[in-house]
Amino acid sequence: MIKYLDANEWKVIESSFHPEYQRSSESIFSIGNGKFGQRANFEEHYSGDHHQGAYIAGIYYPDKTKVGWWKNGYPEYFAKVLNSVNWIGLDLKINGLQLDLNTWKVEAFERVLDMKSGVLQRSFKASAPQGMLAVEVEARRICSMADDDCGVMQYKIKANEACSIEVVSYLDSDVENQDTNWDEKFWNLLEAEAEPDLAWVKASTKKTNYFVAAAMVTNCTTAKKAHKPHSADSSNSLASQSFLVEVEANEWLNIEKHVGICSSLNHEESALVDVASEAAQGSANKGVDAMFKAHAAAWDRIWENGDIVIEGDAEAQQGIRFNIFHLNQTYTGEDARLNIGPKGFTGEKYGGSTYWDTEAYCLPFYLSTHPQKVAKQLLKYRFEQLGKAIENAEKLGFKNGAALYPMVTMTGEECHNEWEITFEEIHRNGAIAFAIYNYTRFTGDKDYIAESGFDVVLGIARFWAQRVNWSENKQAYVMLGVTGPNEYENNVNNNWYTNYIAKWCLSYALKCILYLKDSHETAYAEKCKLYSFKESEETQHWADIIEKMYFPKKANSKVFLQQDGFLDKELIPVAELPEADRPINQKWSWDRILRSVYIKQADTLQGIYLFEDHFDLETIKENFDFYEPFTVHESSLSPCVHVVIAALLGYEEKAYEMYLRTSRLDLDDYNHEAYQGLHITSMAGTWMSVVEGFGGYRVKNGVQHFNTMIPKQWTSYSFSVMFKGRKMQVEVSKNKTAVKLIEGEAITVFVNGQEETLS
Amino acid sequence: MIKYLDANEWKVIESSFHPEYQRSSESIFSIGNGKFGQRANFEEHYSGDHHQGAYIAGIYYPDKTKVGWWKNGYPEYFAKVLNSVNWIGLDLKINGLQLDLNTWKVEAFERVLDMKSGVLQRSFKASAPQGMLAVEVEARRICSMADDDCGVMQYKIKANEACSIEVVSYLDSDVENQDTNWDEKFWNLLEAEAEPDLAWVKASTKKTNYFVAAAMVTNCTTAKKAHKPHSADSSNSLASQSFLVEVEANEWLNIEKHVGICSSLNHEESALVDVASEAAQGSANKGVDAMFKAHAAAWDRIWENGDIVIEGDAEAQQGIRFNIFHLNQTYTGEDARLNIGPKGFTGEKYGGSTYWDTEAYCLPFYLSTHPQKVAKQLLKYRFEQLGKAIENAEKLGFKNGAALYPMVTMTGEECHNEWEITFEEIHRNGAIAFAIYNYTRFTGDKDYIAESGFDVVLGIARFWAQRVNWSENKQAYVMLGVTGPNEYENNVNNNWYTNYIAKWCLSYALKCILYLKDSHETAYAEKCKLYSFKESEETQHWADIIEKMYFPKKANSKVFLQQDGFLDKELIPVAELPEADRPINQKWSWDRILRSVYIKQADTLQGIYLFEDHFDLETIKENFDFYEPFTVHESSLSPCVHVVIAALLGYEEKAYEMYLRTSRLDLDDYNHEAYQGLHITSMAGTWMSVVEGFGGYRVKNGVQHFNTMIPKQWTSYSFSVMFKGRKMQVEVSKNKTAVKLIEGEAITVFVNGQEETLS
């Protein structure tokens, strides 16, 4: 745990400069608008250790796979979201001396992420390495949520003596990913042009051939006058506008930079420079204040639907808002070709690609805090990639339209290359089917099954039907050689979670068929033809599997066994593990982890979380009591599920402990890895842990239930959820839970077991 | 299978030029002398596809590990035997036209590996691309077994018209490995010098800092006169001597090149150039014929001890001699720092490093065909690396002097980086202990246990004692997360072979202690102190494990289960597998192989092979009948064990089928991979399959048994074995088996069940 940031309900504050944590701060204070994002790098030159990063959603490069020992079926590339045009650059020379916080003496420094209005602010005083010269700077910037092609920044500087300030405002497309596998350059540097009133750069990605353009308007003013650039320069990758201004002592020089960024994902290549230029000029015409205001208004709307208020615990409040803030700036649902990378726009690890995290953790957040269409875009993303999922399954030897969604992907093609994950962590397929079910139960939009849902469910059901095999020995269907969500086990037989969700998928496919035959007969007939679906033959096999699927169990108990052979391990709880051995993923060799009892994230509990209604409370309790002591929570996705189940079981202390761990994972940098980027997808788990954990929010048989509890550290908390076109506000204090209908038609809900009709 | 070579009892013959198989031929016709080796590259320039390769034993480079996803405990490097000085080079220009079989028209071509005398020969006629010029060449070369620092070659050329022939004889140290991970150069090119009568080059390896020098004397003569070089040139990596000779039509030009090669492994760096020069000059002084004669005499001695004669089946005869030939030129036992790379000096795959192949397959060959000291060197190699094996175990969390020998190594440090192999294929430890037992029973040298054997056995026993864990569930000791010799299963629980050899190691350690206490009391006391061995405490634990080790079994049968859960697989025999799906390691994704029943090499049978005396014939038969149908033999180490057991069970056809597969694996290039180098270590398996398979050779309770059979394709066969200082000759014909004592004191043996005393 690294604690250097101040607690505040709406802000993240670095109140003195910590160059030693600069990379972490750059991640934590990142801003974005779903379309592009920017690490919290300094605008002015900084020669200290840092990681410059700006990312445009969907613009990726297929980085050639690096592997020690090739296995059949490994993908050729790992898709990486590209570090792209550096648009924030301002080079400043005061009396010819370059401003650089690594060499200047920093006397006052504050970096603030204002989550309410979505603004990154920074102010500092710094004095030159030699002499008496000192400057004061106030900077702020946004990736506009209102005009999502625009980045806007304001940078004010004054000096303690009359001096000349040279400002070089630039766009630079010659940037590199730090995570390149083979030290390759990913960009073709095409052209750049600079005029005094407008400058732009244009580049294209190698191999994938995306085009990106960025344009800027830079205004430089003092109280007395607007200054013109004394030069505008360009190379093939750099466009700059330079100003030379003589200022009085303590006279503010105000620099405003309006940037337009766009790509061939959304525009014709030939139009890109015009589109970017118009965005920059449009922003400049509106002015910095108006742009910030419109941006803040967009954030107001987001908070209106998605805020969680916690009273009496500033750290908990800051934690949850930090999570909600980053989720919203990572994904907005505007574009179904985009998805939610595990690090969002905050770093390069995991390549910005899509994981099962989206369906398993993020979807519930977007379902409850955004209009229905946002979650639907996430479903559409997978539907559009169904063909690739079928190809992916074919590569592994499956037939007849079986679909295996990839572990990691940008376009639907598999990117990951560890056999035990790529080929075996197939439970991901279940999450993708479950997301369709989840979407329909939270929105009521069952038509989606006829629209596209069944297509995906069918491919997935066909996969499971081929992936199991009949064991003569067990007289049951078994699933051999899998890796469950608990990645601290590889290539196991009969992972309970995987077997359970496979069986559920087959059942759900049967239900979908009944529904379609009942209400969308024509659509169903068309799909049967399209997918050569032999209903009676295939569903008969599914029904047989459903009936005879094997599930490992602990004798004389209600405990489901994580996999075959689990009880042969040494059952020593985490509490008895020496502190020096943790985290085990850093201290132990992989084989030792695998044969130990320790669990990265408890996948049996994950299954119980998803299918809670299938189990009685005693079963849930026995399983939680059995698995929790062996769980090391070394996956960021682990603690949230434990909050939800612990809350259900009334384990208040455990729930609160796990809540802090999930909500402040990055703010307090629990695992010393914030420098690589934030855990964006697990942030949705934090949301779940409040709403489903403490708020006890469930949908059962189409009806909402709230069974609330409140941690003793809190005086009250509130959240809102959207459900079937309505919006509900839930307020929980020490002795009261109030659920109000804010929008939509009257509805009946259960609050702590009591039926209430809201209107 | 690729068949383009002629069958012959003593020779391997390529009777017309096959440029399409040039890389394979370069492997198959490789020569070496245990100290250095040379692929069968052409002496003259060849612009066609080929793989130039010369290797010096023990001179390696720690090539930086390449890996997709790093796991704790992975090694930093993979040791690679270096492609080193190209010493065979002769550049030839006839009337200014470079001789190159890729562009000249080849009219007659023969490449012959004469295994009897260890000579690579080549002759061809070739005509120039344009015009009437044609040449005839006769070349031969050796890596001298008699003077093992010397390579000697003779190259005779004549033309069909009077012409000028320019000969550039050179040494070139600027060579690269084709298997480099990161396209790095491995050599520092130090210096070279050329005089008319002697030229040399010197280079050193990066990182490991080995120094290598090569020197040459080139003699160029026609019948009339000896020619002097017209120039001698050098750069930092190249030394050459050039001759320009005017020859008459059909006048032979005779080029003789005497090369000395040595390294800092055996000499002071400062002396290297002198040593190499003296070797080259010494060879030149003796002359080509004398050098070839001394070399042939050394091979005569090898064949005297190690030949196997098969009458009536030229392919079988050629196959077994090819195997024996390559084993002998790969390892001579002169130097305990060296070992047997899976490809010897014939290619770069597997890096020339040491695998468990040495103990499991090669040791029996050297024990029976060479003086005792040769096998002892192989044991010494591991003893010298005991400290590294203890370090290796410590890296994986083991304590108290537990030793885990590496999967792949040059110096004792682990080189391999697949977790399922590196960390889990731990059965290798068992083979290393078994080798000590094997050595003592074949040589009678039990003192070796007191000398060094117990040290190794103790470290290995300590490893197993920590690697098992007590299963409350099974009330037995289990071994979780291992990969057996059948690498088509990874991370399984209770691999029968591994559990069995672990238990055997513990028992053997106890026996060694009894022996030491009985006959080497002082040595034992010293070792107890040296290794802090708490005898009563540790051996009590060992005894408990021996008593309560768990072994998976098939109910109601004598079949040992390969591992827990094996019977949950679909038990479809290989015979029903579509041909298009084979070899499965090229056609199937890894997960599919893992969950299938198919076996790369049957490790349960491997265990039965090693411990045959522990099982009754019915048990052996049931297990063979159960596993053989599921075995795809996609390991080169697989068929030989099946020959031995099939022969034991009287399955003559199966034994012969498997024999052909193992003995002609490279000659007939069964797996289309001879171009990468030959399967040197599995060649020892071929020897086993004749001597232990058809010859039924066993040592039981210190006495030799021969239970012979003869394939119907053979009229007779014979082999010799060394045993406890004696040498026996075994001759088997259709209706008779004769065992004769050739050397040593009288001894009693069993021949087909009959006791005979030989004198």
Image (spheres, coloured by chain):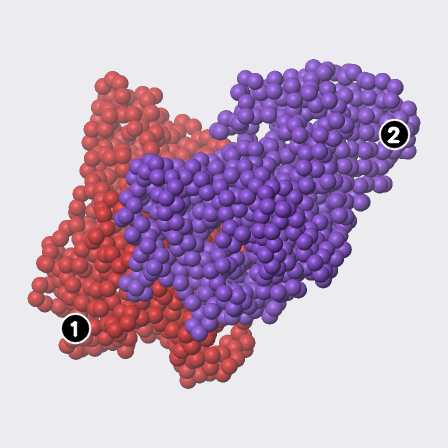
Chain colours: A purple, B red
| Residue that numbered label 1 is attached to | B751
Image side of residue B737 versus residue A418, left or right: left
What residue is drawn where x is 82% and y is 21%? A221
Q: Is residue A442 above or below residue A134?
A: below
Image side of residue A210 versus residue A392, left or right: right
- Mark 2 falls on what kind of element? strand
Nearer the observer, A1 or B657 = A1
What residue is drawn where x is 30% and y is 37%? A529
Q: What percent of the width, then of the height, locates residue A426?
A: 43, 50
Image side of residue A554 versus residue B158, left or right: right
Q: In this view, does B125 lie above or below A709?
A: above
Chain designation of label 1: B
Image quadrant where residue A296 sits: top right
Tell me the kind of residue under disc 1: Val
Task: Assess whether mark 2 and mark 1 are in contact (beta carbons under 8 angstroms).
Answer: no
Image side of residue B748 versus residue A532, left or right: left
Nearer the observer, B378 or A581 = A581
Tell me the kind of residue under disc 2: Ala
| Residue that numbered label 2 is attached to | A159
Q: Is residue B340 above or below residue A515?
A: below
